[in-house]
Image (cartoon, rainbow, N blue to C red):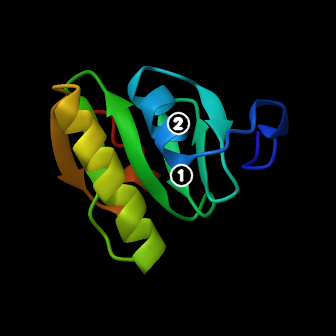
Amino acid sequence: MTGKSFAKIRMRKNEDVVDKFISGGMMGGTKHLFIEGPTLYSYGHHFPLAKRVPEGLLLNTDRYSMTTSHHRGLVNRMASAAHIPVHPTTTKRLEEGQESI
């Protein structure tokens, strides 16, 4: 599945995508933020933003763009509000298949 395969599950707001991701949703997205399985991507497969793991969420702390920083802040705030632990990670570790903290 690619970032554009979720067209049938297109959402209007990034907040809705993050809420669905935090709630365990496996697909859906906006033009620049989308869920594919346990991973949330910002602007494409080249930037995995967050991944659900048994201990909570792995949140990519690598810098990419101002918009991606906004996406990261949104995930961090909404996960914290839902009392889901957030653990920092990197693009490299996520691409290597990191499954836990």
User: What is the distance, in whole Å, between disc 1 and disc 2 at their CAs?
Assistant: 14 Å
- 82 vs 66, left or right, is left
Q: How many marks?
A: 2
Who's the residue at 20% across and 32% down the image? 81
Instruction: Assign the C terminus to one quadrant of the image.
Output: top left
- In x, y percent, where is residue 21? 47, 31
Type of amino acid under label 2: Asp
Residue drawn at 44 percent across, 31 percent down? 19
Residue 23 location in percent, x, y?
Answer: 42, 21
- In the displayed structure, 9 sits above or below 70; it is above
**Quadrant holding the N terminus:** top right
* Front residue of this view, candidates 16 and 92: 16
| Numbered tag placed on residue 16 in the rendering | 2
> Residue 96, can we see it?
no
Q: Secondary structure at mark 2?
A: helix
Is 38 drawn above or below residue 54 in the view shown?
Answer: below
Q: Quadrant of residue 58?
A: top left
Which residue is at the front of the view, 89 or 24?
24
Q: Quadrant of residue 66?
A: bottom left
Look at 58% across and 25% down and name the residue there: 26
The 10 Å Cα crowd at callout 2, few under 14, some 14 to 19, many 20 or more, is some
The residue pinned by badge 1 equals: 41
* Amino acid type, residue under disc 1 in the picture: Tyr
